Image (cartoon, rainbow, N blue to C red):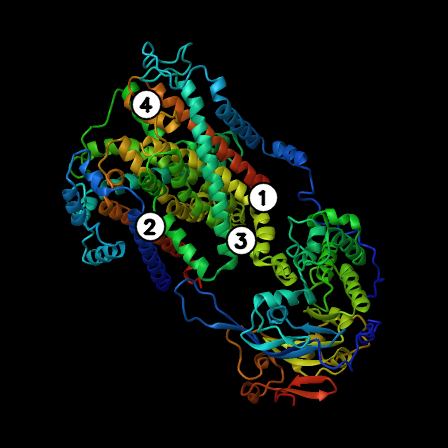
């Protein structure tokens, strides 16, 4: 188990490095001048441009730049943002909590609603409720999350005449305002995951309910409630867990656009700005962080899998 | 063992496996699909409408999608503008119809590139194995660890806004996914005896991959392509919504949403209808993908 | 069993000089699979020092329990797997040292018939294309000639020429096995490995296929390596039998000799496990095998059979027994427990 964990960790680390190096090189090979992007339309002398280029270190060969990035990264220095002039580590970690909160709420909503839909669907298999829920689920898979966000905000402002506070409040400074701001984007973000969970948990519930041990349980006279929740649901949690790991990437990507729609100053918005400003160090840091989150969560999911399912513990 | 007569007469007795997919004609196959997967058939019809709309937009659309009408700005649905008009007085319905062209074009091109490149990489990596496979897997894992939208955003912004670049960016997203599927399929197929038989016959590796590997993964690839089409349409709209995808004034669904976002309180129809168009199209591709999967693999109980 | 196996056609070409296929000290170890960065790990000794030969027109049966490495030998002989050590010599040439291209050129002379008639035919290809594949690959004949060849082969294995345009799933297991045979024979090979070729079939169809194989051998002078766990079938078709246990040969003898005079305790146990139709033929006491087959990843020392052997003596575990000739063409792994 520990060995498997370490192996996964080592592989994750390797993947992060492949990601870092590829990104680093590709950014610098594809045309697009970051210096001009920082200056905007301002008229600047060629000497000044040359000076800024040297300041950013962009006049050196790519491999040299990469080496100095790594030397810095080892000491916890991931570079300085071109556009903000502050260390990227500082910028990113200030904005990370919002994105994590948003993602977390979305996952929590999705799991609750998705599992509920899946269980009801499985119990009422092929009934009208099942059919309605299945159509709802596949529709949920097809609706773009940012459009849903737009619809939610339109509905709340036009029909309910309510809009969340405009200026962002942190959870610890003003929890009520914070949650009011988070509710709609999190709901929009979680829809696809909820729909996937509903579909998956329905089919895995049906599978478990058809299994021999469930038949034995029923034959032994176990109450249906126990069969359903203690056994069937628990066994169908495993694939759901994996699904969350797989979908996390899409979820994190979704934060970029939803933070934009709802004007939330999170990591997603930062990525978007970094991309627009050709802010290489900031972009590098964001992508690295997203990748690390994705990889770590997936390792955790795999470990949970091993924990819940003892057969996996001694795999290999 | 008793002495059975030595004979060349074929035993006509054991007809075991003749129940699954006999050599039905294309037409018969289609009929069986419609009969067993009615939802899939309806979806296919919706997709057909979508395609016809895309090709015939200039003939069917009631207005020129770029024509501005200062007298009809931000008007709700009416007889003149069935789905309302936008901030420049352009007809929303006509713009949606023309917008389908971009979605269809970007979707088709991206999926074709992904199929070609992804399947090639996946088949080669799965069949040849070894260091090529290991390196490729590392890259694919790295690609899949970056949230898809961020990767696309990044590439599209580096390349600059144009339809071609959107396709390139989306292909970078989908190629690794297709490659992973194709690799898994190739690994499954590789373990079958008919591959060993081909090796023993002296078939080259290329021949084995193309003549035996590829045809046997076509069903899975079709399903993935159908589901992928929906994903690509949403991703294109998202990029364009963020201002990094298809450049204006081309009427695309993502652009309409981003323009409508400014006026959501006064002109909700500007975001409701393009979004419905996206959702309906994607839903059709998802349902078709589901139906095809059930059709190709009837063992799965739903 | 009314027909003695040695009377099978022109098989007993004992005089004919060098063997067609000669396997010497063949070893195959599989590393135990690990994920990335695994390193280390043990090996499965699937085949561990096996030697035998097959003469022209001869059928050699290779028997043993499942997992004893007999199918691995079949794959090694055909170059589907590369041996860890040892050589496979076919018609005087060493196959193990050949490059991929050289091997591909030899391939038309060595063929295989598989156990599973459902996995062995490409479901997306028409039967005619399946059979013609060897001809296409080796550029034999033009389109018309290949079609004629396919029809001829179909007739030879007892199918109709019309079947060429149908797909494998339209055929039964036995018919599919016939298609597999036709494919193997298309390039006119000298040597065919039959890897459990009839094991997946019903008994009545088994007989038909075995008879077909014998008929084809008589007509074409084929050599077979007939791999099976079913001694009844092997007895019916093989001229000589090699008995394997856990990756090693324990006994080899002409078929009748082996059945009449089995020396190794394992062979005796295998033979006594055959359900006897005619009670007059007694093998003496029925020898029961106890325990499970040990893992080839960690095989017993000395005589690998000793943990399950009813006669095992302490010395059995000490040293690996050599194959020793006990009669004309009859060799046995001389474990101290019986020799």
Dot 1, how many residues are within 10 Å of its Cα: few (below 14), some (14-19), or many (20+)? few
Secondary structure of the residue carrying tag 4 is helix
Q: Are marks 4 and 1 in contact (CB under 8 Å)?
A: no
The label on residue B260 is 4
Query: Which residue is painted at 30% across and 33% down in the image?
Result: A185
Q: Are marks 2 and 4 on the same chain?
A: no
Depth check: give the residue in front, C85 or C196.
Answer: C85
Q: Is residue B296 above or below residue B81?
A: below
The label on residue B297 is 1
Query: Which residue is painted at 78% across and 60% down in the image?
Result: C204
Q: Are marks 3 and 2 in contact (CB under 8 Å)?
A: no
Query: Which residue is painted at 19% across and 33% down in the image?
Result: A41
- Number of labels in the image equals 4
Dot 3, how many residues are within 10 Å of its Cα: few (below 14), some (14-19), or many (20+)? many
Give the quadrant of the N terminus of chain B. Answer: bottom right
- Give how far across and how far down residue B124 sits, in percent: 50, 54
Residue that carries the numbered disc 3 in the rendered image: B186
Residue C107's quadrant in the figure?
bottom right
Dot 4, how many residues are within 10 Å of its Cα: few (below 14), some (14-19), or many (20+)? many
Chain to which the residue tagged by mark 4 belongs: B
* Labels 4 and 3: the sequence-earlier one: 3
| Left or right of C28, for residue A61 | left
Q: Is residue C256 above or below residue A57?
A: below
Secondary structure of the residue carrying tag 3 is helix
């Amino acid at each position: 188990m520990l060995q498997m964990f370490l192996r996964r960790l080592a592989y994750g680390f390797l993947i992060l490095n492949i990601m870092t190096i590829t990104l680093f090189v590709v950014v610098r090979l594809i045309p697009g001048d970051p210096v001009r992007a920082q200056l905007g339309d301002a008229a600047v002398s060629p000497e000044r441009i040359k000076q800024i280029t040297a300041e950013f270190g962009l006049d050196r060969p790519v491999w040299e730049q990469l080496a100095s990035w790594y030397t810095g990264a080892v000491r916890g220095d991931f570079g300085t943002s071109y556009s903000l002039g502050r260390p990227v580590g500082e910028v990113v970690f200030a904005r990370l909590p919002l994105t994590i909160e948003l993602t977390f709420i979305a996952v929590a909503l999705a799991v609750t609603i998705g599992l509920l839909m899946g269980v009801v669907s499985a119990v009422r298999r092929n009934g009208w409720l099942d059919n309605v829920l299945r159509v709802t689920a596949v529709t949920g898979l097809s609706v773009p999350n940012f459009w849903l966000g737009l619809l939610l905000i339109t509905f709340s402002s036009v029909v309910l005449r309510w809009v969340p506070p405009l200026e962002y409040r942190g959870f610890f400074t003003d929890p009520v305002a914070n949650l009011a701001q988070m509710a709609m984007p999190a709901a929009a973000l979680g829809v696809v995951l909820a729909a996937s969970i509903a579909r998956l948990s329905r089919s895995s519930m049906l599978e478990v309910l058809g299994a021999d041990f469930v038949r034995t349980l029923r034959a032994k006279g176990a109450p249906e409630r126990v069969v359903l929740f203690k056994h069937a649901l628990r066994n169908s949690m495993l694939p759901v867990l994996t699904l969350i790991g797989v979908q996390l990437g899409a979820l994190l990507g979704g934060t970029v656009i939803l933070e934009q729609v709802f004007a939330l100053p999170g990591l997603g918005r930062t990525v978007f700005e970094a991309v627009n400003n050709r802010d290489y160090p900031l972009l590098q840091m964001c992508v690295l962080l997203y990748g690390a989150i994705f990889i770590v969560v997936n390792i955790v999911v795999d470990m949970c899998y091993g924990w819940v399912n003892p057969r996996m513990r001694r795999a290999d | 063992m008793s002495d059975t007569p030595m004979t060349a007469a074929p035993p006509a007795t054991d007809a075991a496996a003749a129940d699954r997919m006999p050599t039905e004609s294309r037409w018969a196959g289609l009929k069986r699909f419609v009969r067993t997967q009615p939802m899939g058939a309806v979806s296919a019809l919706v997709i057909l409408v979508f395609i016809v709309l895309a090709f015939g937009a200039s003939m069917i659309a009631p207005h020129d999608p770029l024509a501005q009408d200062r007298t009809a700005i931000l008007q709700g649905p009416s007889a003149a503008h069935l789905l309302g008009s936008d901030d420049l007085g352009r007809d929303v319905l006509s713009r949606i119809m023309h917008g389908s062209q971009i979605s269809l074009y970007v979707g088709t091109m991206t999926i074709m590139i992904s199929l070609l490149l992804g399947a090639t990489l996946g088949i080669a990596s799965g069949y040849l194995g070894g260091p090529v496979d290991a390196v490729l897997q590392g890259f694919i894992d790295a690609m899949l660890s970056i949230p898809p939208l961020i990767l696309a955003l990044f590439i599209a912004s580096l390349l600059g806004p144009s339809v071609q670049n959107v396709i390139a960016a989306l292909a970078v997203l989908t190629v690794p996914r297709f490659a992973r599927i194709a690799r898994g399929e190739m690994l499954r197929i590789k373990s079958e005896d008919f591959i060993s038989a081909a090796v023993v016959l002296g078939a080259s590796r290329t021949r084995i991959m193309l003549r035996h590997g590829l045809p046997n993964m076509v069903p899975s690839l079709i399903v993935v392509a159908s589901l992928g089409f929906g994903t690509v349409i949403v991703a294109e709209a998202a990029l364009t919504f963020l201002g990094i995808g298809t450049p204006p004034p081309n009427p695309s669904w993502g652009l309409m949403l981003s323009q409508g976002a400014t006026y959501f309180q006064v002109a909700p129809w500007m975001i409701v209808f393009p979004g419905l168009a996206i959702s309906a199209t994607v839903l059709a591709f998802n349902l078709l993908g589901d139906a095809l999967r059930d059709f190709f693999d009837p063992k799965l109980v739903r | 069993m009314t027909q003695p196996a040695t009377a099978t056609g022109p098989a007993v070409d004992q005089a004919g000089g060098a063997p067609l296929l000669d396997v010497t000290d063949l070893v195959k170890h599989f590393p135990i699979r690990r994920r990335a960065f695994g390193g280390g790990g043990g090996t499965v000794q699937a085949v561990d020092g096996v030697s035998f030969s097959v003469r022209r027109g001869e059928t050699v049966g290779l028997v043993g329990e499942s997992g004893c490495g007999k199918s691995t030998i079949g794959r090694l002989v055909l170059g589907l797997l590369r041996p860890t050590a040892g050589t496979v010599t076919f018609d005087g040439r060493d196959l193990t040292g050949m490059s991929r291209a050289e091997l591909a050129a030899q391939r038309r002379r060595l063929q295989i018939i598989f156990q599973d008639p459902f996995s062995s035919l490409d479901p997306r290809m028409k039967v005619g294309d399946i059979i013609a594949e060897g001809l296409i690959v080796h550029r034999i004949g033009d389109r018309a000639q290949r079609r004629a060849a396919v029809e001829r082969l179909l007739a030879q294995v007892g199918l109709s020429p019309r079947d060429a345009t149908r797909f494998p799933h339209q055929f039964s297991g036995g018919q599919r096995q016939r298609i597999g045979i036709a494919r193997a024979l298309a390039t006119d090979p000298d040597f065919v490995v039959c890897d459990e070729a009839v094991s997946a079939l019903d008994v009545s169809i088994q007989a038909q296929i075995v008879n077909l194989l014998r008929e084809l051998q008589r007509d074409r002078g084929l050599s077979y390596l007939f791999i099976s766990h079913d001694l009844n079938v092997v007895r019916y078709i093989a001229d000589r039998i090699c008995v394997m246990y856990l990756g090693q040969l324990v006994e080899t003898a002409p078929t009748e000799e082996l059945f009449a005079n089995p020396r190794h305790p394992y062979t005796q146990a295998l033979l006594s496990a055959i359900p006897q139709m005619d009670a007059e033929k007694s093998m003496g006491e029925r020898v029961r095998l106890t325990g499970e087959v040990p893992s080839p990843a960690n095989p017993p020392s000395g005589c690998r059979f000793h943990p399950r052997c009813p006669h095992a003596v302490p010395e059995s575990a000490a040293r690996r027994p050599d194959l020793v000739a006990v009669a004309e063409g009859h060799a046995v792994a001389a474990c101290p427990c019986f020799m």
